[in-house]
Structure formats: structure tokens, C-alpha cells
Amino acid sequence: MAEPCPRCSFPDVPGDKCPQCGVLVALYRASLDKLRRGPGGPVNAPPAAVVPPPVSPAGPPSTLRPSFHGSALGLFGIQAVNALLTLLTAGVFYFWAKTRARRYLLGESELEGDRFAYHGTGGELLVGFVKGMAVFFIPVALLTILPELYQAPAEIRAALRSLLWLAGLLIVPIAMVGAWRYRLSRMSWRGIRFSFRGRARQFVGIFVVGTILMSLTLGLYYPIFVTQRQAFMVSHAYFGSRKFDFDGRGRDLMRPFLVMVLLFLPTLGLSWFWFSARRQRYFTDHTRFGATRFRSTVPGGALAWVQISNVVAIVVSLGLLWPWTVVRSVAFTLRYLSLLGPLELADVHQDAQAASATGEGLAGLLDADFGVG
Amino acid sequence: MTRPPAPLRSLTAAQRRRLLALTLGGVAAFFALALLAQLRVLVDAEWEVQSLAQALRTRALELPMRAVSSLGTGWVLGPVAAVACLVVRVRHAGLALGVIAAGAGAMAAANLAKVLVIRQRPNTVLWAYPSAHTFGIVVFVSLLLYVLWTLDAPPRWRRLTLLGGAALVLAVGASRLYLNAHWIGDVLGGLAGGLAFAAVGVLLIDRRLVTG
């Protein structure tokens, strides 16, 4: 059936070429799609559904592999500029530096021929940091300094210390959720934003109960705790209008965890890497996006080698090799990651959520990463 | 017996001032465009230009545009510049060396400048700003014009080179837009940065070889 020309709206284009404006319809439409999906499209560009890849109906389930194109030299150049500008601005540029590194790492990650994009700004991080300071550090500083100044009795100081510990227990999960919400909201692929829609209150419950049970069981509750955290973070994450799903259960990791604990001393701690790889594979394999299932084949030995050699490289080079270790880690993770099944994106549309960087600022202050595998 | 080097024309004080102004203007424009790109101020206008460029795509033009675009790469500019420098070397070895150094510096500068702005291209690949193709061809054409001028080549040659060079710069810049490889801001950044770099190169060569 003849379609109208996407450029001049000539009603019935008989073939591939518009008789009125001469544009090649398929080529023009493909270019516009690419432009619209790309990270540089204007905010008010029409929200396009992502064009699905052609799927052969009778063929085997497709496997997609993300790839990483970054190089240590590229990140080193970025870090050199970052370090210089951070020094020149007495540290203020740090927030922009962080953004630049993230933009590079995501911009060099590719899936199905299109790169991911990071849209966060240094200004947002700076504001988030200031708010984080106001929300957390000023009350904490006052609660620790004032009793000293007024020489409060020991019981009051002990009570305030407990109060601080409790406040920390509540603020860490809020910061983790806030940081995750912010980072996902600033990521996109083919012009479609990611988002996180979980409620911090729910995660506080998981975190507080998990932390207390971890203490009571001397750490044996760890596999269940991390799986619950992962489930919360993944199952409330969205790409456009479609959510991710997670169907892992913590008890499945209990046996590998106990084996790791038993072998920890005999292997001088190396068993942790095998458990870590097992956990990463488990978390990835139990993550779904529509009909697509994620898969990781990361081996324990290779993970141990990458992580140990990264630490050695950073220490020996006094931090100069940090870009190399980052690029290597990202490339390593993506090398063992694949997406199984058809990536059905036809009904995915833009559904961006607002998110402030306060949680990100708090997470930065508390060094509380979310550790989503 | 070695031939004595040909006499070189030197820049007058007024010409030096103009080149300095060009350098400062080019640098200012380069950084201003970089800032605008980073802050995404021009994104709507750039998107409009890009849509327009994509509307002009036809199968017949794909290969010629790729060929034109490749004229701005080191793979083409390097050998061409090397051959040109061999010819210049017959007249003045020092000038040839200066031009080679400026050319190599330009390629390095164009790629290093990309670290300043981490920006994705319309086709989502990184390292958009500035367009190294445009930067390279601008420096090449500018240095070629300077060499012809300082060796006192006939005015007709210089006029032809100016016209041909300007057309080449326009064509390479347009091909980058056409191939969806750059935004218009990246091409303008390459133009501004290339002009500034070439002006600095000419000033340095002139000071070292001619004025002493």
C-alpha cells in the first residue's frame, strides 16, 4: 500500500522515491528514526516507539551481546582534563568530572548498534551534594559537637550515639534508592530513558530488617539480604514504559555462600571471588525484560584475576592506572553478558520520571553504592 | 652542490596582528561552541539542520559523500601532505619541516580536543566535538595557502587554491552532516579550531624561518 511521504506529505508515494520532493522514503525515515532515537535529539522531539529488530518467526531465539568500545587511553585523557580542572577550581569541578566519566563509560557501551547515553549534569550533582550535606551532615555534626561543647552527661551522649546509628541505618537505604533513581533517570538508549519507581520507604524496611538479621545470624543472612535488595532495585526499574523483572530467591545462594565461608580460610579468601561470580551469574540470569532474559557466564577465576590485578595495578601505579582498571572492569562485565530471546521494543515508549540528585549526593557522602549486579 | 633555499616572504606587522586576532577569535569561538554543545543550548537548531541533511540523502550520493569525507582523514591528508612537503623541500627544507610539524600537531590537537567535550554524534558514537575531518582539512588548506604565499607563487595559483580549498572545506563539512557523523556545531567547532591552529602554525613558522 502506498504511504504518504514523511518529508513533504505527498499523499501516495508509488515507489521508494517521492515524486514531489525526490526524497528516498526508506532512507529518510531510517535517518530520522536514528536521529530521534539518538541521545542528541531535542527534548520536544516526537516520542518515538523504538524500532524493533527484524525477528525471523521460525528461527532460533536470538542472542544479543552488548559491547564496550572504550579504551584506557580515552578515559585517561578525560581523567587528565578532570584532574586539571578539579585542581584549578579547588575541587568544585569534581561533580562535572564524575559526570564526564559516566558519560564516557555509557557512551562507549553499545547494544544492537546503538550506544547508551548519560544525561546527568555536574550542576545537578553539586546541588544534590549540597542538599545531602544539609539533610545529613549538618544534623550529625550538631549532634556530635553540641554534647561535647555543653559537656552533656555520659548517658545522654550514649543515647545520642544510638540515635545517630539509627539515623544512619535509615539514611543509607534512602541514599541508595535516591542514587539509583537518579542514575537510571539520566540513562537512555535509543532516546528512551530508564527510570526507577520503587518507594524508598519499602527499601528502608528491607534494609533495616536485613541489617538486624545479618547481625543476629553473624552474616549468614547475607545471601537472602542481597537478593532482596537486588530484587527491589531491579523489579522497580523501567526502560521507557516497560519494567524489568527479577525472579531470584535468596535461598538459592545459601549453599554457595556456605561453601564460600567454609573455604574462606583454607583458600586465603579467594573463595569469595567464586561466590561473587556465582552471585553475579544468578542475579543476571534471574533478570528479565519482557520476553528477554539476561544471561551472565562470568567465571570465578577470571573475576578473581581481574579484581586482584586491578587492585595491584592501582596500588603499584599510585592510581595512574585507574582508567585502565575501570575500562577493563566494564569490558569484562559486558563480555560475559548476553540477552536471550527477542528484544520486543515495539510497544516501549518514552515515560521519563523526575528524579533529584539528593540521593546521589547522600550516597556520595556516605559512600553507599547500591551494588546492583 | 646544494641549492640555496628560496627566499621566503615574511608577514608584515599588520598581517601578524590580523593572524593573532584570527587565532584569538578562533579559540574563543571554539571554546564557546564547546560550551554550548556541552550545555545542549543549540540542540534544537542542530537537530533541525541534521533532519534537513538527512532529507537530502540519496543512494547516488552515498559513495561520493564517503569519498569526500575521507579527504579529511589522516589516511588521505597525511600522504598528500608528505608529497607536498617533498615538493616544497626542493625550494626550502626548513619550510617543509615546519609544515610537517604543524600538520602532525593539528592531527594530535584535533583528537586531544575531543577529550574536552564528551558528546555523542547523531549516530550515537562518542567523540563528536570537534569534527576532526573539518579541523584537518582547514589546517591543510590554510597551510597550503601560506606555503604558496610565502614562496611567492603566482597570484593565479593562490586564487585557485583559495577557491578550491574553500570548496573542499565546505564539502568535507557538509559530508560529515550528510553521513550523520556530526552535528553542525561539531563542524563549526572544527572550522574555528582548525583556523586558530593554522594561524598559530603560520605565526610560528614565520617567526622561526623568516623573521628569525
Image (spheres, rainbow, N blue to C red):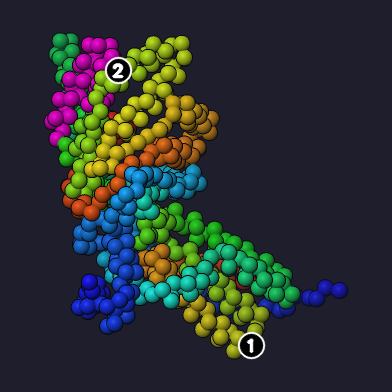
Judge from the rendering whether residue B193 lies leftward or rightward of residue A349; answer left or right: right
Residue type beneath disc 2:
Met
Determine whether the residue tagged by mark 2 lies in a helix, strand or loop.
Answer: helix
Residue A200 located within the stretch drawn in magenta: yes
Q: Is residue B28 above or below residue A327?
A: below
What secondary structure is marked by label 1?
A: loop
Q: Is residue A305 left or right of residue A4?
A: right
Residue B112 versus residue A355 in the image, above or below: below
Q: Which residue is mark 2?
A: A254
Q: CA distance from mark 2 to mark 1?
A: 85 Å
Of residues B212 and A106, which is closer to you in this image? Answer: A106
Let me know if marks 2 and 1 both belong to one chain: no
Dominant secondary structure (helix, strand or loop) of the stretch shown in magenta:
helix
* The magenta stretch spans residue A23: no
Label 2 crowd bin: few (<14), some (14–19), many (20+), radius 10 Å: some
Image coordinates of residue A95 in percent, x first then y, are 32, 44
The residue that label 1 is drawn on is B154
* Picture residue at 59% right of the left edge, 62% below the top: B104
User: Front-most of B197 and A78?
Assistant: A78
| Residue B168 vertical placement versus B180 (above, below) | below
For the residues labelled 2 and 1, say whether their Cβ atoms are less than 8 Å apart.
Answer: no
Badge 1, how many Cα within 10 Å: few under 14, some, many 20+? few
Q: Chain of mark 1?
A: B
The quarter of the image holding the C terminus of chain A is top left
Q: Which residues are magenta?
A: A199-228
Q: Tell me the quarter of the image containing the N terminus of chain A.
A: bottom left
The image quadrant that residue B13 belongs to is bottom right
The x and y percentages for residue B105 are 57, 61
